Structures are given as structure tokens and as C-alpha cells.
Image (cartoon, rainbow, N blue to C red):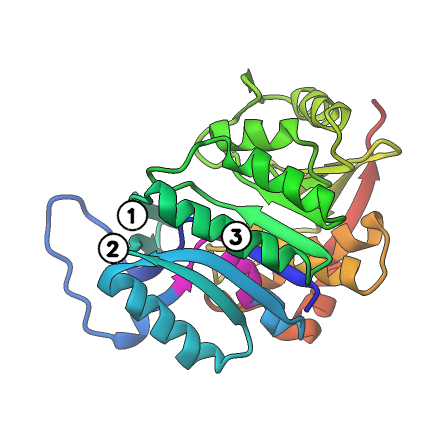
């Protein structure tokens, strides 16, 4: 087992497709194919995509209540133990995320609930699980929100523990947890800037802003920073080079969810197969594009990812 994904605050994702979303009215959904339920949360999603790429992973997280039990049942039913899991159970309910997709207007309305409160004893047990699993893996992906009761500095602690165990770290988070993680110098940082384009206290508007922010993160110890830029593009910065990875032309998007997690799975696929960062980023972007072209949380396996490679072009950024 080479990969560990960490999701402190998993969610049971409910996605509902609505043809014309109107606020303040009743929408009755009669077609079962327009409703989807799946285990979610950033690290969980990465494990789901890795499974499609034939890469085994262990998903570590915190579950609770009846929703947590339903989450575990769905993991077992949908993935038949192909994804190894290590969950700590608490009393409070695992959160649910409700996403309303209006395909006519191409809009997404998301309601993300807070999740359980985790007491100190439970957190200590969770960290023991984390340390034990670090001894068995080469790559650790950490992402998502942090449930109540756990310090927002926890990602900093987890990155430092992984570094001591000589495990490559990938962080995908936002806000204060991201800032604390960056201070620990993870290997790869993919800031989640949905909803707020503020990183390390600075607002990102222009390409120069993004490049400057990425270099600041590099200066703190990261080996690569990946920013989503203007929807279709990704800015990737390392100490040696800066590139824009662009999606060619316009494509008809079927799936509007989870592309960032698919990206990380593709990136890990490349790294796990001995590719350098530049080539691994191409796999990451191809996986994200493939996810957009297929149904929810589905990249069409390795064939789907490889087919999307032809939709990528690169442009060197001089800075």
C-alpha cells in the first residue's frame, strides 16, 4: 500500500439534478437517475478516483452516528473492499453535503454541513492511527475541512509527522488550515480557492498575483504549487519552472463536481509510476478533464485519463 488519504471531516454527498432551480418553490424529482448518493470528502474522493486508476489506497477519516454507518455501508457496497479504510467513530453525526445541479443554467448550489464535534481523547486515538499508517505508505494526501473540537493547526502537525516518516505530502485545503499546513512545508500544495481567493492573507486577482503567491509557498518549503486559474487553466510552479497547463478549446461538460480531487488522483498516479512533476501534472489535469466529460465521480479509468491528454497544452510563464 503506497498511498494514504486523510479526511478529517468526510461527508455523505447527495447530488440532485434540477432542470430549472427556483428559490421559494417545491421541486419534485421523479427520475431516480437524477439523484446520487456517494461517500465524499476530499481525501475520500481521491481514494475513489485512485481506485479507478488501479492504485490501492487507505482512506483514513472520522465517522459518526447513523450517517457515518450509512457512509461505511456505501463504501463497502460500492467498492467491495478495494479501498482499505481506517475510520475512527465518534458519537455525533457525520456531515452531509447537498448539491443542487441546474444543468440548464449550468449552476451549482451547494449546502455543506459542519460535521461532528471531536473530543480530545478521540482525536488522540485518530492521530495514533495516522502515525501507524504513515509507516506503511510513500504518499500522504491531506485535505478538506476540519471538524469542531480539532485545532485548525492540525494539518501543520500532520505534515511534520509525515516528513519525519519520509512520506511525500500533498495538501489540498483552504483558509486558516491551509496557512498552517504551508508553514510546515508540504511537498505539494493545491490551495482550494473556491469561494475565496485569499491565500496567506493575500487576495489573488491577476496571473502575477497567483505566481507571487505560489512562489511564497515555495519559499516556505513546498516543492510544487498548483493553482486553478480561470477555470480552464492550471498554474503550476516549482523552484525550477512555471507553466500554465491549458485545456484546448471548449468541451461539453457533463460532470461539474469533484474535478480537483480527480486532479490529485491523476497526479498521484503519475508520481506512483515514476513520472517527474511535469509529466505527473499532465496526468492530473487529464484526470480532471476526464472527470468533467463523464458522469459523477468517474474518470473512465486509465483509458479515460489517457484520452484526455490530447486536450492539454502547455505555456511557459516567464516570471
Circles 1 and 3 in contact, beta carbons < 8 Å: no
Lower position in the chain sequence, tag 2 or tag 1: 2
Residue pointed to by mark 1: 116
Disc 1 to disc 3, C-alpha distance: 19 Å
Can residue 231 be seen at all in this image of the molecule? no
Horizontal arrangement in the rendering, residue 71 relative to residue 218 (left or right): left
Q: Nearer the viewer, mark 1 or mark 3?
A: 3
Pick the residue in front: 179 or 314: 179
Question: Marks 2 and 1: CB-CB under 8 Å?
Answer: yes
Which of the two residues, 41 or 134, is positioned nearer the viewer here? Answer: 134
Residue drawn at x 29%, y 48% is 116
Compared with residue 238, is residue 68 higher up or lower down, i.e. above or below? below
Segment tinted magenta in the rendering: 39-48
Q: Name the residue under label 2.
A: 91
The secondary element bearing badge 1 is classed as loop
In the displayed structure, 277 sits above or below 75; it is above
- Label 1 crowd (10 A; few <14 / some 14-19 / many >=20): many
Residue 214 in the image: x percent, y percent? 70, 28
Q: How crowded is mark 3: few (under 14 residues within 10 Å), some or many (20 or more)?
A: few
The part of the image, by quadrant, that contains residue 146 is top left
Q: Which mark is residue 128?
A: 3
Circle 2 packing at 10 Å, graded few (<14), some (14-19), many (20+), is: some
Residue lying furthest right: 240
The span from disc 2 to disc 1 (Cα, nearest Å) is: 8 Å
Q: Is residue 91 visible?
A: yes
Residues 68 and 270: in front is: 68
Amino acid at each position: 500500500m503506497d498511498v494514504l488519504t486523510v479526511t478529517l471531516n468526510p461527508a455523505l454527498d447527495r447530488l440532485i439534478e434540477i432542470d430549472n432551480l427556483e428559490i421559494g418553490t417545491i421541486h419534485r424529482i421523479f427520475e431516480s437517475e437524477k439523484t446520487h448518493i456517494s461517500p465524499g470528502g476530499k481525501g475520500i474522493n481521491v481514494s475513489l478516483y485512485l481506485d479507478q486508476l488501479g492504485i490501492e489506497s487507505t482512506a483514513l477519516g472520522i465517522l459518526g452516528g447513523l450517517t457515518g454507518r450509512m457512509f461505511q455501508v456505501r463504501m463497502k457496497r460500492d467498492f467491495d473492499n478495494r479501498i482499505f479504510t481506517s475510520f475512527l467513530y465518534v458519537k455525533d453525526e457525520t456531515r452531509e453535503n447537498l448539491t443542487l445541479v441546474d444543468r440548464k443554467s449550468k449552476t451549482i448550489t451547494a449546502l455543506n454541513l459542519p460535521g461532528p464535534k471531536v473530543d480530545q481523547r478521540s482525536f488522540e486515538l485518530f492521530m495514533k492511527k495516522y502515525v501507524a499508517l504513515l509507516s506503511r505508505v510513500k504518499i500522504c494526501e491531506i485535505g478538506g475541512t476540519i471538524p469542531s473540537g480539532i485545532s485548525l493547526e492540525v494539518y501543520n502537525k500532520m505534515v511534520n509527522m509525515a516528513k519525519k516518516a519520509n512520506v511525500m505530502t500533498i495538501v489540498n485545503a483552504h483558509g486558516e488550515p491551509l496557512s498552517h499546513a504551508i508553514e510546515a512545508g508540504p511537498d505539494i500544495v493545491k490551495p482550494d480557492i473556491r469561494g475565496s481567493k485569499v491565500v496567506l492573507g493575500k487576495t489573488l486577482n491577476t496571473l502575477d498575483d497567483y505566481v507571487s503567491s505560489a512562489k511564497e509557498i515555495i519559499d516556505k518549503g513546498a516543492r510544487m504549487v498548483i493553482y486553478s486559474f480561470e477555470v480552464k487553466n492550471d498554474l503550476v510552479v516549482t523552484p525550477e519552472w512555471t507553466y500554465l497547463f491549458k485545456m484546448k478549446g471548449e468541451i461539453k461538460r457533463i460532470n461539474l463536481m469533484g474535478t480537483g480531487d480527480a486532479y490529485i488522483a491523476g497526479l498521484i498516479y503519475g508520481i506512483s509510476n515514476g513520472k517527474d512533476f511535469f509529466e505527473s501534472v499532465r496526468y492530473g489535469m487529464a484526470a480532471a478533464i476526464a472527470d468533467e466529460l463523464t458522469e459523477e465521480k468517474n474518470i473512465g479509468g486509465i483509458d479515460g485519463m489517457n484520452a484526455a491528454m490530447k486536450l492539454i497544452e502547455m505555456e511557459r510563464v516567464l516570471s
